[in-house]
Image (cartoon, grey):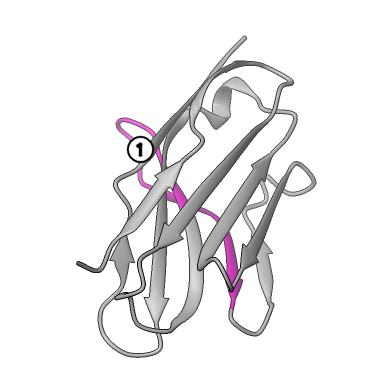
Amino acid sequence: QARLVESGGGLVQAGESLRLSCAASESVPQINVWSWYRQVAGKQSELVAEITNGGDISYADSVKGRFTISGDNAKRTVYLQANSLKPEDTGVYYCKVRPVWGSPYWGQGTQVTVSS
């Protein structure tokens, strides 16, 4: 079954770091774009970071300089290194991939909670 599996969320204090991972099963078609979104209750989901197959990377202004997205093609995994975390980074982080053909895939989400 084609799916994405996320891990790495947790409860941390402000200023600490987390590393989120998103692994795609082999049955997910060739991936063109990997993205991390976060959802805060009552707010619209926000695109946090994105990396393309060609290596183009973009970040939300709110995380620039603190978060780093990277990928390991051999492992079909993308990472989000989140440093200097702030309480406003709290939310459910979702991985999304856009294959070169077909519909996007979403992960199940991983909770990140940053206490002040």
Q: Nearer the viewer, residue 43 or 9?
A: 9
Q: Residue furthest bottom?
A: 101
Indicate left or right for 58 with 111 as reference. Answer: right
Q: Position of residue 97 (x, y in %)?
A: 41, 69
Q: Residue at 40% x, 89% y: name it.
A: 100
Q: Is residue 116 magenta?
A: no
Q: Main secondary structure of the magenta part?
A: strand
Q: Compare residues 80 and 28 and report the one nearer the observer.
A: 28
Residue 112 sits above or below residue 25 on the image: above
Q: Which residue type does callout 1 highlight?
A: Lys
At label 1, counting other C-alpha atoms closer than 10 Å, the crowd grade (few under 14, some 14-19, many 20 or more) is: few
Position in image of residue 34 (x %, y %): 50, 68
Image height of 66 relative to 58, above or below: above
The verdict on residue 42 being magenta is: yes
Q: Give the residue furthest to the right.
A: 65
The C terminus is located in which quarter? Answer: top right
* Residue 12 on image: x %, y %: 59, 17
Residue depicted at x 42% and y 55%: 95
Which structural element holds mark 1?
Answer: loop
44 and 71: which one is in front?
71
Q: Is residue 96 left or right of residue 77?
A: left
Highlighted range, magenta: 37-52
Quadrant into which the N terminus falls: bottom left
> In terms of image quadrants, where is residue 58?
bottom right
